[in-house]
Image (tube, grey):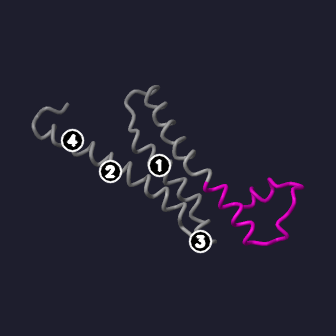
Amino acid sequence: MTVYASSLGDAPSFDHDPEQEQMAFGRILDAMIDPAVQMCEVAADEKKKVKGRWDREVFVLNCLAHLQVCVAWWGMRTGSDSFALQIDRECWKHLSLLKEREMRYKYWWIRGLGN
């Protein structure tokens, strides 16, 4: 919030109305979440191209966890955890992919076909 407030510079103030400030910052967070999640996924894909053996889902989950911590204070301050829940849904999606991959690996390993 401090960075946001300092970025306003000489822009018209909200006359120190915390509700207006929270609404404005909430709109910024709302517009930022999807691109930030996409950035995590694209970075994971690019890293896999360069590195070869790369655990994409773990990388994405780490990025999402960091993002979730960054927006968690917003929920504490406003009483709304919608941004954290949005990221949480993405985390569960990637956890499911990771679990599915591990189950496939174990299935093939048990049958002696894994390497």
Is disc 1 in contact with disc 4, using a CB cutoff of under 8 Å? no
Front label number (1 vs 3):
3
Q: Is residue 68 above or below residue 38?
A: below
Magenta region includes residue 17: yes
- 53 left or right, relative to 20: left
Tell me which amino acid carries mark 2: Ser
Mark 3 or mark 2, which has the lower sequence index? 3
Which mark identifies residue 62?
A: 1
**Do tag 1 and tag 3 residues touch (Cβ < 8 Å)?**
no
Q: Position of residue 15 (x, y in %)?
A: 85, 70
At label 4, the amino acid type is: Arg
- Sooner in the amino-acid sequence: mark 1 or mark 4: 1
Which residue corresponds to the image point at 17% horizontal and 33% vertical from the top-left?
114
Q: Amino acid at mark 3?
A: Met
SS for tag 3? helix
Q: SS of the residue at dot 1?
A: helix
For mark 3, does the 10 Å Cα neighbourhood hold few (<14), some (14 to 19), or many (20 or more) residues? few
Q: Which residues are magenta?
A: 1-30
- Distance of label 1 from label 2 (alpha carbons): 15 Å
Q: Residue at x 29, y 49 (%)?
A: 99
Name the residue tied to disc 3.
76
Q: Main secondary structure of the magenta part?
A: helix
Q: Are marks 1 and 2 in contact (CB under 8 Å)?
A: no
| Rendered location of residue 62, percent (x, y) | 47, 49
How far is mark 4 from mark 2, CA to CA?
12 Å
Image location of residue 77, percent across then percent down: 63, 71
The quarter of the picture where residue 30 lies is: bottom right
Q: Residue tagged by mark 4? A: 104
Q: Position of residue 47 (x, y in %)?
A: 48, 32
